Image (spheres, rainbow, N blue to C red):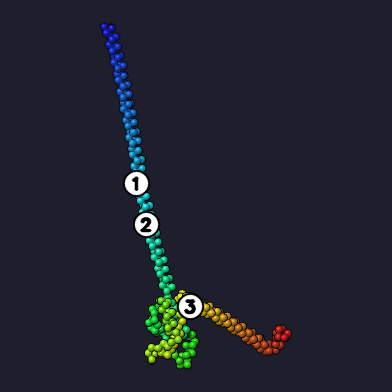
């Protein structure tokens, strides 16, 4: 029996060792499984991060593409605006060039005398058959002459002393001045201008702008002259008012002295005499 017991004991020991080994194997297997799970989890996390980064890169690429498209659209719009502005500038330059050419083709005729009672409408009617007219300017007479004429029972209407007529074609203007100068106006015999004479002269290299400049210059001279006259009148007024005030002060002084003298005589005293008057 004893040897059998020892074998039994040996088998029990071997069984315990086997059990411990199996436990260790199981533990090692569980540890491996856990490690594999952790590694797989880490790998999945890394994959997710890489996917997210790739998605961010894709979003950035999409944003860059949209930004590039917006820049292209802005460039196109600016180019279209610049093109339209250049077209407008070219159109304006062409219009100004055409206007200058038309202006260079125009001619101006000077009228040295305007018959009485002739108005711009009548003058246009008389000169239109000799060429197309554009602008007419007639210088009115001095208002004082008109008042004087009215006073002595003369013509009460507004008269003009000289004038300028602009023709569209300077050749027509030259021909008209050469043809009508020192000739009778004519027309109907009952017309008030029938026996009057034309006094026309073509002005070469003279444009309407020169006339406008002269008119503005004369206007500025008149305004300056009026300002000078107003300034002189203001000085005269101030001088007159100062003299009036001075005379009032002198009169008040004389009145006060007279009152003082009357009071002195009434009291029986002597009349006070001014030192300046005694010195004189």
Q: Position of residue 142 (x, y in %)?
A: 49, 85
**Residue furthest toward the right?**
279
Instruction: Give the alpha-carbon distance from disc 3 to disc 1, as whole Å.
Output: 70 Å
Horizontally, residue 50 falls left or right of residue 178, namely left
* Residue 203 in sight from this viewpoint: yes
* Residue 114 in sight from this viewpoint: no
Q: Earlier in the sequence, mark 3 or mark 2?
A: 2
- At label 1, counting other C-alpha atoms closer than 10 Å, the crowd grade (few under 14, some 14-19, many 20 or more) is few
Horizontally, residue 240 falls left or right of residue 209, namely right
Q: Quadrant of the N terminus?
A: top left
Quadrant of the image occupied by residue 100: bottom left
Task: Please tell me which residue lies in front, 174 or 271.
Answer: 174
Residue appearing at x 59%, y 82% in the figure: 239
Q: Are marks 3 and 1 in contact (CB under 8 Å)?
A: no
Task: Please tell me which residue lies in front, 13 or 132.
Answer: 132
Q: Is residue 140 above or below residue 84?
A: below
Residue appearing at x 40%, y 82% in the figure: 127
Q: Which residue is mark 3?
A: 215
Quadrant of the image occupied by residue 237: bottom right
Q: Position of residue 198 (x, y in %)?
A: 44, 86
Q: Position of residue 153 (x, y in %)?
A: 45, 93
Helix, strand or loop for disc 1: helix
Horizontally, residue 124 falls left or right of residue 6, namely right
Q: Which mark is residue 77?
A: 2
Which one is in front in this view, the residue at disc 3 or the one at disc 1?
3
- At label 2, counting other C-alpha atoms closer than 10 Å, the crowd grade (few under 14, some 14-19, many 20 or more) is few
Q: Which mark is residue 193?
A: none
- At label 3, counting other C-alpha atoms closer than 10 Å, the crowd grade (few under 14, some 14-19, many 20 or more) is few
Q: Position of residue 150 (x, y in %)?
A: 46, 90
Q: Which residue is mark 1?
A: 62
Residue appearing at x 38%, y 61% in the figure: 84
Q: Earlier in the sequence, mark 3 or mark 1?
A: 1
């Amino acid at each position: 029996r004893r040897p059998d017991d020892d074998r039994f004991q040996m088998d029990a020991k071997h069984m315990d060792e086997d059990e411990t080994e199996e436990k260790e194997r199981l533990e090692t297997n569980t540890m491996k499984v856990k490690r594999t799970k952790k590694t797989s989890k880490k790998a999945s996390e890394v994959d997710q991060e890489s996917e997210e980064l790739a998605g961010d890169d894709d979003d950035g690429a999409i944003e860059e593409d949209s930004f590039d498209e917006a820049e292209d659209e802005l460039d196109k719009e600016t180019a279209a605006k610049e093109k339209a502005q250049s077209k407008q500038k070219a159109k304006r330059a062409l219009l100004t060039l055409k206007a200058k050419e038309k202006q260079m083709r125009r001619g101006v005729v000077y009228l040295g005398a305007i018959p009485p009672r002739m108005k711009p409408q009548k003058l246009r009617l008389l000169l239109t058959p000799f060429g197309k007219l554009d602008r007419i300017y007639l210088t009115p007479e001095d208002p004082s002459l008109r008042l004087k004429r009215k006073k002595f029972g003369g013509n009460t209407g507004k008269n003009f002393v000289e004038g300028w007529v602009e023709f569209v074609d300077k050749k027509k203007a030259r021909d008209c001045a050469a043809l009508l100068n020192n000739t009778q106006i004519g027309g109907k015999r009952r017309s008030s201008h029938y026996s009057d004479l034309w006094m026309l002269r073509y002005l070469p290299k003279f444009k309407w702008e020169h006339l406008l400049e002269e008119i503005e210059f004369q206007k500025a001279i008149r305004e300056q002259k009026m300002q000078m006259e107003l300034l002189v009148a203001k000085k005269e007024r101030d001088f007159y008012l100062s003299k009036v005030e001075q005379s009032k002060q002198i009169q008040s002084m004389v009145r006060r002295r007279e009152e003082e003298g009357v009071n002195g005589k009434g009291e029986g005293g002597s009349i006070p005499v001014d030192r300046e008057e005694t010195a004189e």
